[in-house]
Amino acid sequence: MLFSGLAEKLQDTFQKLKRKGKLTEKDVETALREVRMALLEADVNYKVAKDFTAAVKERAIGAEVIKSLTPGQQVIKVVHEELVRLMGETQSKIAPPSPPPQAVMMVGLQGSGKTTSAAKLAVHLRREGHRPLLVAADIYRPAAIYQLEVLGRETDIPVFSMGKEDPLQIARAAMKKAAQEQNDYIILDTAGRLHIDEALMSELGRLKEGLNPLEILLVVDAMTGQDAVNVAGTFHQQLGLTGVILTKLDGDTRGGAALSVRNVTGCPIKFSGTGEKIDAFEPFHPDRMASRILGMGDVLSLIEKAQQVVDVEKSRLLEQKLQNQSLTLEDFLDQLQQVRQMGPLDELMGMIPGMNKAVKGMKNMAVDEKELVKAEAIVKSMTRQERLQPEIINSSRRRRIAGGSGTTVQDVNRLLKQFGEMKKMLKQFSTMDKSRLKKTKGLFPFK
Amino acid sequence: MLNIFKDGLRRTREALQGRFDQLFTKNEIDEEFFEELEEVLISADVGVETSMKIIAQLQQQLRDARVKETAQAREMLKELLVNIMDGDEPALLSHASSPPTVFLVLGVNGVGKTTTIAKLAYSYRTEGKNVLMAAGDTFRAAAIEQLEEWSKVVGAGIIKHQTGGDPSAVIYDAVSAAVARKTDLVLCDTAGRLHTRANLVEEIKKVYRVIDRALPGAPHEILLVLDATTGQNGIAQAQYFQQAVPLTGIILTKLDGTARGGIVVAVKDITGIPVKLVGLGEKKEDLQRFDPSLFAEALLG
Ligand SMILES: Nc1nc2c(ncn2[C@@H]2O[C@H](COP(=O)(O)OP(=O)(O)OP(=O)(O)O)[C@@H](O)[C@H]2O)c(=O)[nH]1
Ligand SMILES: [Mg+2]
């Protein structure tokens, strides 16, 4: 499919590369081309994506990635960190209304979601202890004023409207009214307009001059494509935006427009609309947005967890053993223990993108927590000799191990069989194609 | 009739022209040429997959025909785009052999469904047809009132229920009324919904069934409205709606902005749904037929 997980793709790329030994600059470039494709498929602007991958390359080619044991994961991590950095800190705040009342202007293209966002913002501000007044200044779209009035009634937020007067007159009257009624913010719902519509853009300019608003928020549909840079750039140039609200994030869009908009305006993305309900309005999370743009699920948390528990030295040894196929049950136990330290298995599985689908096809996968506990008990009941040389485990030894670990002989047999299969598969590492790789992953989830 | 369309696409053309002129006056077809071509296509929202496909096809054709000059490459590219968008003839709207004809209009939030219905109504009104609007958006605040205002402007009838009512009930009433009155055209508005909403499919299916029950063989067009500023998500929109009902065409709105609407190239390539109409502004007159060759021409400057 179009949006198959980037993380998976990169892992595959690097999995292949690993067998070649050292990572070269060219290998990193190959991977970064995939990153670029993921960004473009997520609607990140062409130029922005290009500049971005160039910046990441510098870091990725540095020692921190190439020398690591898991370069694939490291590249993802660097990309993600850079994305978060580019999207800026969370600043999900509206400036304080001093002295009250202060004006907040909602601007944007037609159909971007200004009216709904205005109402959502009002509800949000009220929750923070403010007294917002909604102002109907979209005098063009049929029933726009009425729409705001309905939303006001539903949310119990006062709405000021004056019919189809000049928006600046409306706004001025609203400020007066707000002062009388002790509203500290007025939220102005303006008509949607094209950024190239000179007449309507200068109307906004006049509004700004006449009102001197505290905030001018650009409302952007998360599904916007490459044009987002033109739109946001022009609005920012002509009005000086103070922030962005990203709407319709409840869909399946990757929302790359967020990065483009942030990039050309430098303004913080303050909130995101995540549904039709009035309280579906959240502070913006750059980190989640970055994962989303890359199509990675929560793989980052997974990598971080792994980094906390995986002993690098041990991993290096294991790496070698995998290569000369001298893996023992002791290593197996080690791996099991590391995995268990990371938390409940099904939770971990859930963090891997596409995993739910994949799990169905993997019968051998030891996702069952109980199975893991059992396996650990079995290996622990073996002597050191047995762990290093499983071949010596005959039927009397099997009975003893089963007894010692509180399992059955069948359980012991199964474990030994699995281990044998895994070793066999490891042997095929060198000639391994993709489908076998998947199977191995199943038996040995974190290698 | 195509004049306004040309005018609307002028900006598209202007926006792209600079790039393509540069691209095609270079005279030499080299690696850089294809890279720039990729940038132009992707920047127009054609998308990675479809852009790559187009470029690969172009490369093949250039090799086969031993073309070395960019001027010829441009013609080939244009032809490729026209071929994807289907032929030289504008895709026409289907009508019932005897009235009423029923159109169902679908799309995600804010793409321009209601406005497009008003524009459609207006264009049929100018041909002297009777038009009935069905206020099937019973969800969004003031959606019914919005359609009602438009119905007055363009001189169309309207059938409406209450906000919060069952959309298929309104639409059933409208189609039944049109059958009784022998109205020429029924235009069914629907609520804008993100295509990922679980019950959307069921609701749209129900509306579709109900129309067929009120008038066997209807709806005669199921039109998906796509906003030209939409990026790659447009593909998912088309696919999800198509899963629910057999879409017969796309209306590409807001082509009067700077967005190039290249997403329809990908949508056509992937789903096969043709673009039939384009929206070029907010006024009742701002609707035109889609012309693939004009569109490709505009894209290529
Ligand atoms: N510039 C421009 N604006 C358009 C065009 N078509 C619609 N609009 C504007 O887009 C906004 C949304 O249009 P609507 O017709 O309300 O969209 P909708 O799909 O019915 O919206 P919902 O019912 O809320 O989902 C309005 O401000 C329209 O005037 C177009 O072709 N060009
Ligand atoms: Mg509507």
Image (cartoon, rainbow, N blue to C red):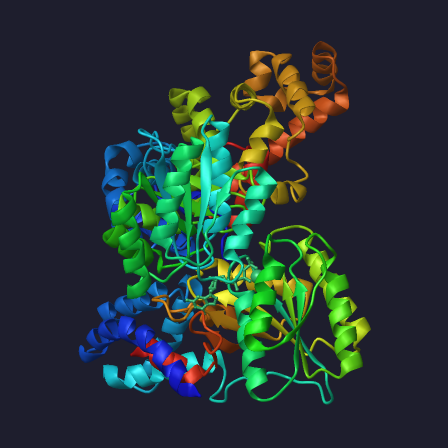
Please state the horizontal and vertical placement of residue A297, each as a whole percent of the image: 50, 40
In the visual, does B213 lie left or right of B188? Answer: right
Q: Please state which of residues A108 and A327 is positioned toward the viewer in this rendering.
A: A108
Q: Quadrant of the C terminus of chain B?
A: bottom left
In the visual, does B288 lie left or right of B44? Answer: right
- Position of residue B195 relative to residue B127, above or below, is above
Please state the horizontal and vertical placement of residue B158, each as a whole percent of the image: 67, 70
Q: Residue B95 is drawn in which quadrant?
A: bottom right
Q: Please state which of residues A173 and B28 is positioned toward the viewer in this rendering.
A: A173
- Position of residue B135 relative to residue B71, above or below, is above
Residue under the image location 49 percent in, 86 percent down: B87
Please state the horizontal and vertical placement of residue A103, each as a whole percent of the image: 35, 40
Q: Residue B47 is drawn in which quadrant?
A: bottom left
Q: Please state which of residues B296 and B290 is positioned toward the viewer in this rendering.
A: B290
Residue A275 visible at all: no
Q: Residue A359 is drawn in which quadrant?
A: top right
Residue A380 visible at all: yes
Q: Please state which of residues A293 and B56 is positioned toward the viewer in this rendering.
A: A293
- Position of residue B228 relative to residue A49, above or below, is below
Residue under the image location 56 percent in, 69 percent down: B150
In the visual, does B269 lie left or right of A175? Answer: right
Residue under the image location 22 percent in, 68 percent down: B32
In the visual, does A19 lie left or right of A205? Answer: right
Q: Quadrant of the N terminus of chain B?
A: bottom left
How many numbered circles are shown?
Answer: 0
Please state the horizontal and vertical placement of residue A96, each as a whole percent of the image: 34, 29
Q: Please tell me in which quarter of the rendered image ligand 2 is found.
A: bottom right
Residue under the image location 54 percent in, 48 percent down: A149
